[in-house]
Amino acid sequence: MNDPLTEMLRGLRLDGVEYGRCQPSAPWATSYPAQAEARFHFLAAGHAFLQSPSGEWMEMHPGDAVLLPRGDAHVLASQPGVPPISVDCMTRKRLCDGIIDLQCPCPDSRNLLFFAVMRFNVDKRHPLLELMPDVMRTGDLAGSEPTIPLLLDAMTREAEMNRVGAGGILSRLADVLTATIIRTWVEHGCGDSTGWLAAVRNPDVGRVLAAIHLDPAYDWSVGELARHMGASRSAFAERFATVVGETPARYVAKMRMHQAHQWLREGQRVATIAERLGYESEASFSRAFKRVIGASPSRSRDSRTVNGSGLA
């Protein structure tokens, strides 16, 4: 049987929102504002530097790829210190297979970057996403996963987009590589032994957390969760609260509202979500939502960027 953290990955999905490429001419720098979706960058040719959300500069070499799972603000540049232009100000031109071309002044074929915008099917405050580092680099994980270099090689061969269908193949490779990065990090790179991760790794509580995260919209009862652990209701409730740090009911409520927040971001109506979660009225759902998220459903629906303490 898979461990609970691996089981949770079965419910974690990424959908590509946008794919594109650019061929900038040095000196260049592009800023990427914070967003709810994840960002993926692949350097097919040339050299670049990434300024991480923390402000640290890291060098990228041809064939390198990075994932920013929470879509935090960052900069890509030919060298540190070049004044950046926001990616939102750059003209987009549609290429084949749903790929866009960011129009760079005086494009240089010696530099080729490919990017993807990807949406998780869970709220960015999901505990697993919160545990991920700001930047996940393939170079840091390739030693633990032999398929990563193979995927990078395949992307390099397709990146020039001179062959029929290359754009579509490249976007699918980006999807697979991103999923592989996350899986490899879970299996080899997230060695924190405290907090939520320790709770997931706990042989008793982990099965319960996996069940909740695989179906976060379900209104789990204490009795049902106790059966997953194989314990009495009282023994389960005490064990869960000790390991996780909050009661089962509170944890379930939090996960249900995080799922509701994700549905709101996807454009679902408040009334529809309230019905899906079993609330008798929009008002009762809205009260429960605000208690957990800290803002009303209508405000969450209209917002695109969320930070750890509420809505930006």
Image: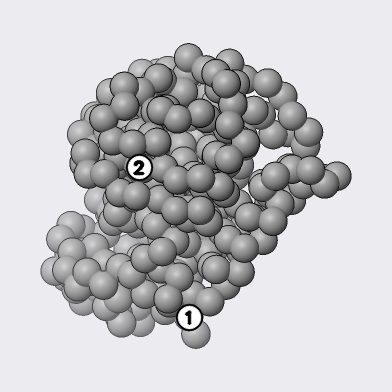
Residue at left offset 69%, top offset 34%:
99
Do residues under tags 2 and 1 come within 8 Å of each other at their CB atoms? no
As drawn, is 143 to the left or to the right of 160?
left
Q: Position of residue 275 (x, y in %)?
A: 52, 34
Q: Position of residue 134 (x, y in %)?
A: 30, 48
What residue sits right under mark 1 in the picture?
Answer: 2
What residue sits right under mark 2 in the picture?
Answer: 50
Residue at left offset 73%, top offset 33%:
98
| Res. 126 in view | no
Q: Please tell me whether residue 200 is drawn above or below residue 99 in the rendered image.
A: below
Q: Please tell me whether residue 44 is drawn above or below residue 262 in the rendered image.
A: below
Q: Position of residue 189 (x, y in %)?
A: 33, 70
Q: Position of residue 183 (x, y in %)?
A: 47, 66
Under mark 2, the amino acid is: Leu
Find numbered disc 1 in the image and state the secondary structure of the residue it sits on: loop
The image quadrant of residue 311 is: top left
| Res. 153 in view | yes
As drawn, is 300 to the left or to the right of 22?
left
Q: CA distance from mark 2 to mark 1?
A: 36 Å
